[in-house]
Image (cartoon, rainbow, N blue to C red):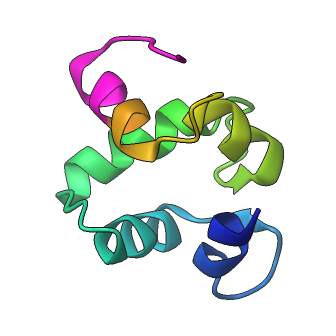
């Protein structure tokens, strides 16, 4: 939850694509704008235009590893473990 709250810079309870991209950059994960669109789309399961906490948890999976989830999104692989 701490990672999500730190990424949610405007404190609205939802991560925008830009907030997600900045947060990932701070963790050493550098994505292009196109890559960040792919990742945000994969994480935004209800297609609301933002990523809420439950979507974030589902996206990073039980390992809590965003790097693994992002690689899966960019490669078109649904890996949750």
The N terminus lies in quadrant: bottom right
Up-down relation of residue 48 to residue 7 (above or below): above
Q: Quadrant of residue 24?
A: bottom left
The answer to whether residue 47 is above or below residue 32 is: above
Query: Residue pushed farthest bottom?
Result: 10
The percent position of residue 59, horizontal first and vertical second, equals 60, 34
Image: 3 above or below 79: below
Residue pictured at 29% horizontal, 71% vertical:
25
Q: Is residue 76 magenta?
A: yes
Q: Which residues are magenta?
A: 71-81
Residue 54 placement, left or right of 59: right
How many marks overall?
0
Closest to the observer: 42 or 30?
Answer: 30
Q: As drawn, is 57 to the left or to the right of 78?
A: right
**72 left or right of 30 in image:** right
- Expressed as whole percent of the image width and height from the top left, the position of residue 64 reads 58, 41
Residue displayed at 67% across by 36% down: 47
Residue at the outermost front position: 63
Could you tell me residue 12's position as x and y percent? 82, 77
Q: Quadrant of residue 16?
A: bottom right
Residue positioned 63% across, 86% down in the render: 9
Please tell me which residue is depicted at 25% across the width and 29% down the height of the picture.
Answer: 74
Find residue 66 and report its horizontal and vertical position in percent.
45, 45
């Amino acid at each position: 939850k701490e990672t999500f709250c730190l990424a949610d810079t405007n404190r609205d309870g939802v991560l925008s694509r830009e907030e997600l991209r900045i947060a990932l950059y701070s963790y050493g994960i550098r994505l292009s704008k196109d890559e960040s669109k792919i990742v945000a789309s994969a994480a935004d399961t209800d297609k609301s235009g933002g990523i809420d906490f439950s979507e974030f948890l589902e996206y990073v999976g039980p390992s809590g590893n965003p790097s693994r989830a992002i690689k899966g999104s960019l490669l078109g692989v649904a890996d949750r473990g």
